Amino acid sequence: MNHKKQILFIEPFPTVMIYKIAKIFRQKGFETVLIILLESETSKEFHLDAFDRVIYFNLKFHKLNLKNLPLIAGSMIKKLKDLTTASFSTFKLNPYVIFARAAPSWPCALARKFFKNYPFIYFPYDIRTEYYKTAEQAKKFGGLPDFEIKAERYCFENSDGVMHKGYTKELEFLEGRMLGDNLKLSELQLSFLPYCTKEFSIPLNKDKLLKKDNKIHIVHIDSMGSVGPIGASYVYDDIMELIKQEIHVHVYSRPNSITIEQLKNFFIEDSEFTRKYKEILESKYFHFHLPLEPEEIVHEISKYDYGLYPSGPETEISSTDLELKFSTGNKISSYLEAGIPFLVEGKAVFTGQLIKKYGVGFVYTQKTIKQIKQILDKVDYKKIEENIEKARQDFDMDKNFPRLLKFVDDVVVRKRARR
């Protein structure tokens, strides 16, 4: 009989950060289970090292609205076998604690209701209420329906603990924004950043492409959903400035709720994006690469000189957008694991503070990016590489895991005391 404590993770699509967390739990003797809600082209073999079991619902991504109801119904009928199998497996789970990752938040809200008697940690990977000051903004600019806004508030208020991956005090700024007033969060909160792991960290690559062509090579990695690259047009605005300076830019986009074929088509089909950025897409300094598995990407990008961390564009709601200031992403650990410094756009305040703390990169603005080549030509690259080695030791998942384990135990104790 299996007496291991079971850690259940629920994600719309798999992320590297959850993989890293789960793997350490498994190494510590816990049973780890992952529920993936959407169809994903992520390698199933990749998850075997971190999870004892993976439950696939294989749902097709559709925005929830009246227009898409026939598509949603048709997709669910086609997936009836997968849904039945996955649901039966879910009913048999007996988790010690549950991590439910958003966005979106409505599946997390449903999971909270289904697993109402179990310790439940809400992990808003993207905190929507940081983006939008009001619900009206969220509907107008983000296309968020009422039920998703209500679901985010429900998750914040009804979870036994909240984990987030940005600025330590970012949850203190949520009151009075998109979710309204009198927001009552759990007292148990944890800022847990997307740390590096020794598994993915590789020796510094001394055989850079720079040696072969005497040109700087910068890489940008991200994930992409159904909106496509036009949803992050600010990235390509920055890329344009780099290409003008004859800097090579390499882009690796990982599909989350789309197929690799759809991903490729975004960059070749006639669209607003390809028309707007035609000069970039046809430039010899722009390189689009097919996605790689997490354990492969660090080896691939280690041959480049810098990683790019652009921030959001200036819009009519930028002045109240807290996400730009407080958030950080998994790409910072990927760059460190690959042994390359990175360039952070100035509006990403918290991430900029991190790279300044460790001395592993530079903060740029929309003014200084126009002279970035001159700046980088004067860099003491060897010194930065020394800082990267030190940063890896401190910005390490194993080193910080005891905080997460204590948080989980505190959540469980609090839940049991309230039964």
Image: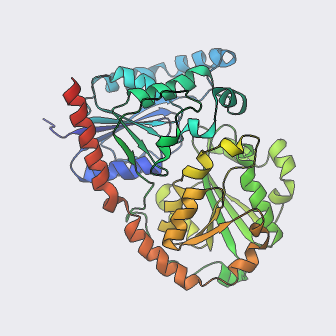
Please identify the quadrant where the C terminus is shown.
top left
**Residue in the foreground of this view, choosing between 276 and 238:** 238
Q: From the top left corner, tell me how far across and down residue 143 is, in percent.
A: 68, 29
Q: In the image, residue 74 lies at what x, y percent?
A: 59, 17
**Depth order, front residue of 6/264:** 6
Q: Is residue 339 visible?
A: yes
x, y percent for residue 294? 49, 56
* Callout count: 0
Q: Which residue sits at x=79%, y=48%?
A: 268
Q: Residue at x 37, y 65 (%)?
A: 198
Can the viewer see residue 299 in this picture? no
* Extreme residue toward the left, this view: 1
Query: What colouring does the structure picture have?
Result: rainbow
Q: Residue 35's image quarter? A: top left
Compared to residue 403, the image places residue 132 above or below, namely above
Does 83 sit left or right of 70 as displayed?
Answer: left
Seen at 55% across and 27% down, the residue is 180
Residue 336 shown left or right of residue 208 in the figure: left
Q: For the N terminus, which image quadrant?
A: top left
Q: Position of residue 413 (x, y in %)?
A: 21, 36
Image position of 223 with respect to 221: above or below: above
Residue 256's image quarter? top right
* Apparent side of residue 323 relative to residue 272 in the rendered image (left or right): left
- In the rendered view, tell whether residue 78 sits above or below residue 218: above
Q: Quadrant of residue 242?
A: bottom right
Residue shown at the point (36%, 34%) measured from the top left = 186
